[in-house]
Structures are given as structure tokens and as C-alpha cells.
DNA sequence: TTAACGTCGTGATTTTTGTAACAACGTTAA
DNA sequence: TTAACGTTGTTACAAAAATCACGACGTTAA
């Protein structure tokens, strides 16, 4: 595992998906698994699975396949930080709360430790044991809690401003749910999750399916 | 525009992003735009932009660039259906409501027309003018409203079951927010939007940024 | 009239990503 | 002991996507 440098982005995404399913397998007390089973569970192909594990330097046995526990750890060593990474969530509307519900307690090494909102009625409240601060305190809290990752779940109109403030405070990675392109320094990693675009895309491809069926 | 057949998926995604920004430009009364401006606004490169437009058979002028209105229409003709596509939203928790807020009224050709939930206290309620039905009525309503696209915003534990019911009722495209791989017939188009994976990915790449900075 | 400029459209090339093919290796069963 | 089996790791190949490089074409200004 000397070089993380040139691991394809798609491999990273799949590793995270593999781990999600491996954690389920662990729950079910499964201790070993073959590449074709992982493939089945994740929608990848067996070759892809083996190739991806190769990339992070984890090797299975041609007889017993992969050890579930070890594999979870290997993926973890690769994609997780050594210590837990704190995450900030900006925007505590419906979306923010949904994210909080989904994320909190799901991953050992990732923890939302600060909430922010502009709404004075939300500021000061505590959700899942996490305090909500006004956006003015972003620099202070982000620095103090050593947060590098933020989730932007605010309306379009505030997103750019909020994002700039986050980056200014030291954030280097953002999950952006606002339906705009954030204009930020190129070294900041931004993952866009526009919900409208997602539906549009599916609407497009769903028609393809219907067309095909009509032709039969 | 004879052949939609072999347009790359990435191009489709970008076309939708271009349109999003073009609609903003239209709001600002801009009538013409150059590829490098679109690139700037969307995070693509100018060549990518031009190539993508080439793919859908829209051509600009080397002097004035692209006509905003025409371009919006051309993209629309390509990615939208002729008539409005109805969409079902399953799960009216925080996430469902967030999606409803974001999506509703944003796109001419896409409209959420049915909500579903298992919670009896939610069933029968009306949000954004849309009625919420019990999941038992999925087949009936989906058929009646001719819905082909659905958004799954239910907890992990119900997602597979709900998805199967949707497909059984005739759904051919799903946006899945549940953190599991849905096991469905291959002809159904599924776009996964696991919120935990999104944060994990950003957490990974955000560290890269920090590492780089430390080396300077 | 001509040269310089900025942009578009596109063939050629490179980079990234996925797939096929197969040797190597325990295990099992004859 | 040997052959057949199923799986892994990896090399070679193919497909998809991005990028480079450049000709064409109005426009502008000398």
C-alpha cells in the first residue's frame, strides 16, 4: 500500500460500496466471501472486485476467497483516516436532518460534530447530541474542532457564500447538495449531489427502457 | 439528432448541468454565450462543451457563440420527454420532503404527482398539493397516473421491498437514496445516491488535499 | 485588400476504465 | 499419484472518455 497516488476514482467508489456490503456480511456472521459474491451484492463484476482489491494490496486465498474481517480492515486502512474525521453540516432543514439521521453512528471514522444554520430558531438547538451554531461561527468552530469535511445542505441562494466561508475556515472537501456549481479554489474537493439532476437523468434513461419494450 | 443511441452517459449528465446554468443565464437576460463561459459556469472544459453540443446536433456561431434560448430548447428536446413525465416519491420523511421542496416546480417536464408512505399518520396528508397514499396503493396509482420514474427515500429496511413493488407496477427508472444495492431486473435504470458513501468519498479526497499542502 | 483575432467543429491522440483470457495454486476425488 | 475443479492475481486487450491540435469561418482593423 505504498502508493495511493494513482488509484482510480472509480475504484475508491467501489471500495466504499464493497465495504458497505461487507459490513452487512459481518453482521450475518459470514467470515469468508468470494469475489463473485461481492460482485453480486454490489453490482460490480468479479474481475473488477479482484482487481480493486489488488490495487489496495489485499490478497485473498484461491480456496477460501477473502476474509471478511480482514478485508473490511484493509479497505478501512486505505480509505479511512487514522483518527476519526469530524464533519460539519450546514443547513438543518429537512435535508440536513435526513443526512444527520443517515450518517450519524454509521461509520466509526466519520462523525458530524457541528451543525450550522442561519435560522435563529434552529441555532442553539441540539440534534443527535450535536449543537447547532450560527453560520457566523463557522471559522471558530471549524478551526477548534479541526474539521476538514463539510456538507452543504442549504438553499441555492446561500450555498456559494457558505461554501466560501467554509473553505476560508479550512475545509478541503465538500458534499454539495445545492443545485449550483460552487466556485471555489481548485484544490478543494467538491462532490455535487444535485437532486434535480438525479431525477432528470433517471427520467431520461427510464424512457430508453420503455422505448425498447415497445419495439419488441 | 437521429441517434440518441450512442451518446455517452457523461455527456447526458453534463447536458443537464449546462441547462441548469443556461436557465440562470436566461433569467439574467443573457441571449448568447461562448463555450468557455459555459465551461467556466459548469466546471467542464470548453472543448467538452462544444463536443457535447455537437453530439446532440446543436451548432453555434464562431462569432456569437451559442444562442441561449435555442440551446436550452435543443437540450430539452434531447433529454426531456415530449409530454411531462410524472414522478412518484416513496417515503415522506425528512429526505422525501427535502426532495419535494427542491424538485417541485423546478422543471417543466418533470412533476411529482404521487407520494407514498407506510406511516398511517402521513397517509392522506397533502404536501405541495400532492396526496400521500399508503404503499399498498402503489400499483393502482402508478398505473393510473402512468408513472415511470420513482424516487426511493425510505429506510434501508423497506427499500428493497418498495423497489420491487414499484417495478412490478411498471416503474422503469429509480433514484435510490437508501444505502443498499437494489436487486432488480437489469432493464430497470437505477441511480444510487447513498449519502454516507458521498461523505466517505469526500473525506478520502479531502485528506489528499491536506497531505499535498503539508508537503509544500 | 489583407492580416490578425477569437471562436467553432472535428480528426487524431492520450488517458482512464473495464473486460477477457489464462497461469498458478490449493483442494478434492479418482 | 494424477486429473479435474474453482478461485485468485495479472497481463493483454478493448471500450469509453477526455484532451490536443488544427482547419474553417466571420469580424475587425490596419
Image: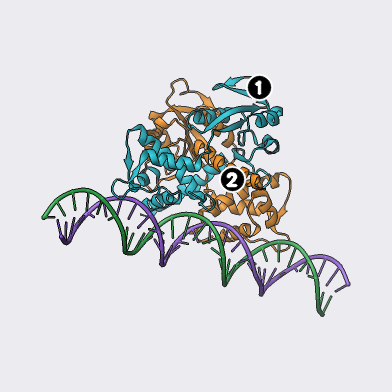
Chain colours: A orange, B cyan, C purple, D green
- Identify residue for label 2: A208
Residue D15, image x and y in percent?
55, 60
Q: As displayed, is residue C23 above or below residue B51?
A: below
What residue is at 71 percent from the left and 38 percent from the top? B168
What residue is at 51 percent from the left and 52 percent from the top? B8
Which quadrant of the figure has residue A141? top left
Could you say which disc has been placed on residue B26 in the image? none
Left or right of residue B193, residue B139 in this image: right
Q: Is residue A97 visible?
A: no
Task: Report how many numbered discs are placed on residues in the image.
Answer: 2
**Chain letter, disc 1 residue:** B
| Mark 2 Cα-neighbour bin, 10 Å: few <14, some 14–19, many ≥20 | some
Q: Nearer the viewer, residue A172 or B179?
A: B179
**Chain letter, disc 2 residue:** A
Q: Is the residue at mark 1 from the same chain as the one at mark 2?
A: no
Q: As displayed, is residue B32 above or below residue C1?
A: above
Residue C6, image x and y in percent?
26, 51
What residue is at 70 percent from the left and 29 percent from the top? B140
Element class at badge 2 = helix
- Identify residue for label 1: B123
Q: Is residue B85 visible?
A: yes
| Mark 1 Cα-neighbour bin, 10 Å: few <14, some 14–19, many ≥20 | some
Element class at badge 1 = loop
Residue B112, image x and y in percent?
56, 29
Q: Nearer the viewer, residue B188 or A18?
A: B188
Left or right of residue C11, residue B2 in this image: right
Left or right of residue B98, residue C9 in this image: left
Q: CA distance from mark 1 to mark 2?
A: 32 Å
Q: Nearer the viewer, residue A149 or A205?
A: A205
Q: Nearer the viewer's eye, disc 1 or disc 2?
A: 2
Amino acid at each position: 500500500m505504498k502508493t495511493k497516488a494513482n488509484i482510480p476514482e472509480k475504484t475508491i467508489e467501489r471500495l466504499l460500496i464493497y465495504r458497505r456490503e461487507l459490513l452487512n456480511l459481518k453482521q450475518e456472521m459470514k467470515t469468508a466471501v468470494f469475489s463473485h459474491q461481492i460482485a453480486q451484492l454490489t453490482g460490480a463484476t468479479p474481475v473488477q472486485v479482484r482487481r480493486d482489491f489488488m490495487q489496495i494490496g489485499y490478497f485473498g486465498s484461491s480456496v477460501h476467497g477473502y476474509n471478511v474481517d480482514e478485508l473490511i480492515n484493509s479497505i478501512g486502512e486505505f480509505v479511512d483516516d487514522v483518527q476519526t474525521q469530524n464533519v460539519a453540516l450546514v443547513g438543518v432543514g429537512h435535508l440536513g436532518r435526513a443526512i444527520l439521521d443517515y450518517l450519524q453512528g454509521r461509520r466509526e471514522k466519520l462523525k458530524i460534530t457541528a451543525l450550522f444554520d442561519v435560522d435563529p430558531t434552529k441555532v442553539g438547538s441540539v440534534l443527535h447530541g450535536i449543537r447547532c451554531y450560527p453560520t457566523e461561527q463557522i471559522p471558530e468552530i471549524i478551526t477548534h474542532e479541526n474539521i476538514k469535511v463539510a456538507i452543504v445542505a442549504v438553499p441555492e441562494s446561500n450555498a456559494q457564500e457558505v461554501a466560501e466561508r467554509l473553505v476560508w475556515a479550512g475545509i478541503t472537501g465538500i458534499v454539495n447538495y445545492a443545485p449550483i456549481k460552487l466556485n471555489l479554489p481548485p484544490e478543494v474537493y467538491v462532490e455535487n449531489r444535485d437532486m434535480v439532476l438525479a431525477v432528470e437523468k433517471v427520467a431520461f434513461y427510464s424512457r430508453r427502457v420503455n422505448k425498447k419494450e415497445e419495439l419488441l
